[in-house]
Image (tube, rainbow, N blue to C red):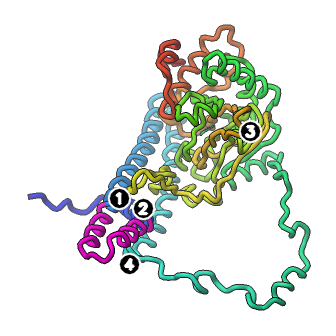
Amino acid sequence: MVGNPGPLSPVRSYVRIMADATAKKKVPTLMAATLLGARLGGSDPKEKVKLKVRMEKLKESIVREATVREAEMRDKEEKSAIIAAIDCLETTKDQEEAIDRCCDILRERLGHLYRREEQFKAVRGAYDESSSDEEIDEKGEGEGARGRVPGDVGDLGYWRGLLEREEGPGSDGVRPAEEPSAPSDPLEMRRELRNRGFLRVRGSLPSEKASASKAIVCKLRDAGWPPVFCFLYDAPWDLVKASWGQAELLLGGPCVLEPSLAAFLLDHRRSTGGERYVGQNFALPHRDYTYSASTFSDGEPKILSVWVPLNEVTTENGCMYVVPREFDENFDKDGTYEHMSVQTTGGMKDRRFLNFPINGAKPLPGQPGDMMCWFGNTIHWGASCHSAGAADPRASIALVFRRSDAVQEFDAKACLTRQVERRLAEAESAEERLGFVKDALGYFEHWYDVPKGLREAIGGAGGGSK
Ligand SMILES: O=C(O)CCC(=O)C(=O)O
């Protein structure tokens, strides 16, 4: 006989409740499926029972998947903090320094756990209050839903008066053509980055180096090499160096560079042909990291994703899109399934469901010399090149900087320091740079297929610099 599994541990029950909450949020989709099915099935009671069973099954599968994903994410974060703490105790020579640093790591982690505990209480409250998963919002159209209208819709005088009312400048709805650029004062820039989750800093990098890098990726393409090989040359490293300074300003301290260097040169013909080529855009909305992995427990960013256009990038040739923090209700809710699963393939055939409001998405066009950056947990994606932009498709490089004093992830030892960057900049031979290029190719293999010939030519992606 199978025994009673007994009460769940606090962590497991937490995960289960969050998973149930996830399923509950997905109920509108399930309801739609049910209503559609009910319409197709007419009033046949047997069909109705079948649909109910199907809906229950769907819900169960959502709960199961959410439970596993959330538990996985939690384990990964715990493992990372524990390894960093042990590593610090084992490798720091001075005992007092080791204890201090270790306490910092644990305090940092605890800060995030306390924050999540608060969020969890709110979710549980909302979950307990609702009586049924299948409940539909009873407030339909009408005054309850729309609120009170500010005037009498049938009164022409009201509408005339509306136009005659004196308004301030700009009330004609015409917007300035150019968006205001980011503030140039570093403190203001940091404030804007923190408030919006992203920042575009115009003209902060040497534009001639960006244009030279564009010429390099095009020459590489003509010779059959993917754009990431541009890191064998000087101009992209000059951009790395200049971005490094900006990142340190924005993150407020010395930084290291993650080894996941990326370079892009889109190709409209290849992508419309369904090819997955090295250097293509990363088109699916994603966060690179969770909120806890991206920020200190006071909310300041410890990771900065940096994206550098090498030519003019537009909404036609494949610019980046971000979801500003103000639109992203899960920005800091890294205890929820939707946090990392920003888009999911649902139970209804191959339909994709977005777990963020697409209406808030913001394109980031720009010029060579600009720098775009965002939090590690800001939702973003690279648009595809449209036919209208095919003659000059987007070229770019992408980098991830991390504050040196941030809790390290497993592969942090592979991060580049300023000393390594200087050594690379002065390197006489291509060998060491080639190591980084090979590693970089390996980091993104899930986005594209590394052709066999290329893999053989460089002796295997991912076996580079270490
Ligand atoms: O450039 C792109 O298409 C995607 C870039 C990206 O996702 C990243 O830098 O994290």
Residue under label 4, please give it. Answer: 131
Q: Earlier in the sequence, mark 4 or mark 2?
A: 2
Q: Earlier in the sequence, mark 2 or mark 3?
A: 2
Residue under label 2, please give it. Answer: 22
Q: Quadrant of residue 90?
A: top left
How far across and how far down the image is residue 311, in percent? 76, 32
Q: Can you tell which of label 3 and label 1 is closer to the viewer?
A: 3
Label 2 element class: helix
Residue under label 1, please give it. Answer: 63
Inter-mark Cα distance, 2 to 1? 7 Å
Residue 207 vs 336, above or below: the answer is above
How far across and how far down the image is residue 253, in percent? 69, 38
Residue under label 3, please give it. Answer: 313
In reply to whether residue 50 is colored magenta, the answer given is yes
CB contact under 8 Å: marks 2 and 1: yes
Q: Earlier in the sequence, mark 4 or mark 3?
A: 4
Ligand 1's image quarter is top right
* Magenta highlight: main SS: helix
- Amino acid tagged 3: Val
State the residue in front, 82 or 269: 269
Q: Which residues are magenta?
A: 28-57
Inter-mark Cα distance, 1 to 4? 18 Å
